[in-house]
Image: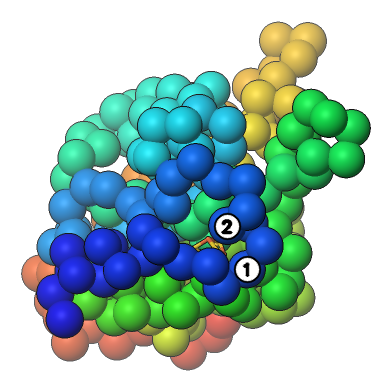
Amino acid sequence: MTFDDLRASSQGCLACDLSKRRTHVVFGEGDPKSPLVLIGEGPGEYEDKAGRPFVGRSGKLLDKAIEEAGLRREDLYITNTVKCRAADWSTGRPVNRPPTEAEVEACRQWLVPQLGMIQPKVILCIGAPSAKNLIKKSFQITKERGLYFPCEFARTAIATLHPSYILRNMHDGGDGGYSLLVADIKKAWAAAERLMRDPEKTLPEKQGSLF
Ligand code: URA
Ligand code: SF4
């Protein structure tokens, strides 16, 4: 199976209830040969409509941070923990919500082979659901972001703040944690470059410590 075959077969997925209200299965985009993969939470309204990850307000902020970190979005691979939009529809107007554990578990059937084919050096988890899925269940985003952790699907994984969290926290002249997002992207890329140059590089013994 090729990467495109995997993407194509994901498009009809009915493995969880998020399939009922979605417009698009948002598989991911970018360079599938990138040493760095960014993994968000899941598509929102705009991503569901466009079929592309991170194209709404959060996406604009992420793009700015990627650029400020000295990178180009097209050189990375960007995807999400769940590929369909999670929203609460009970009030008639959909309100985005984090995916449930069961939805995250169901969608690993796409994420796991996707990462198996990309074989990234480094995974950058964007937000808590992604870090809980890929690093450890007990991950605490505000305490443990920016640190290297072992990961089954890459040589190492780092987590950072989600742009939607940053947007909610930007007030009174504060940056809401935006500078941390930029710093974490830079750090993740530095680790990916280092591991490309020196594939034998040993990782730190101590969880969370620096390279
Ligand atoms: N938030 C995410 O986590 N992913 C997207 O693709 C868009 C917004
Ligand atoms: Fe399938 Fe994932 Fe969409 Fe659920 S969220 S229907 S598992 S692609």
The residue positioned farthest toward the right in the image shown: 91
Pointer 2 and pointer 1: residues touching (CB < 8 Å)? yes
The residue positioned farthest toward the left in the image shown: 197
Q: Secondary structure at mark 2?
A: helix
State whether residue 161 is above or below residue 109.
above
Q: Residues within 10 Å of mark 2 (few under 14, many from 20)?
A: some
Ligand 2 is within 8 Å of the C-beta of the residue at disc 1: yes
Q: Residues within 10 Å of mark 1 (few under 14, many from 20)?
A: some
Q: Secondary structure at mark 1?
A: loop
Task: Provide the residue designation for mark 2.
Answer: 19
Residue at left offset 33%, top offset 79%: 113
Residue at left offset 58%, top offset 37%: 44
The image quadrant of residue 106 is bottom right
- Tell me the distance, in whole angstroms, between the alpha carbons under discs 2 and 1: 6 Å
Task: Provide the residue designation for mark 1.
Answer: 16
Quarter of the image with the C terminus is bottom left
Quarter of the image with the N terminus is bottom left
Viewer-closest of 158 and 54: 54
**Percent position of residue 93, x then y:** 79, 27
**Percent position of residue 201, x then y:** 23, 82
Ligand 2 is within 8 Å of the C-beta of the residue at disc 2: yes
Give amino acid for label 2.
Answer: Ser
Give amino acid for label 1.
Answer: Cys
**Percent position of residue 155, x then y:** 33, 79
**Percent position of residue 182, x then y:** 44, 36
Residue at left offset 75%, top offset 33%: 94
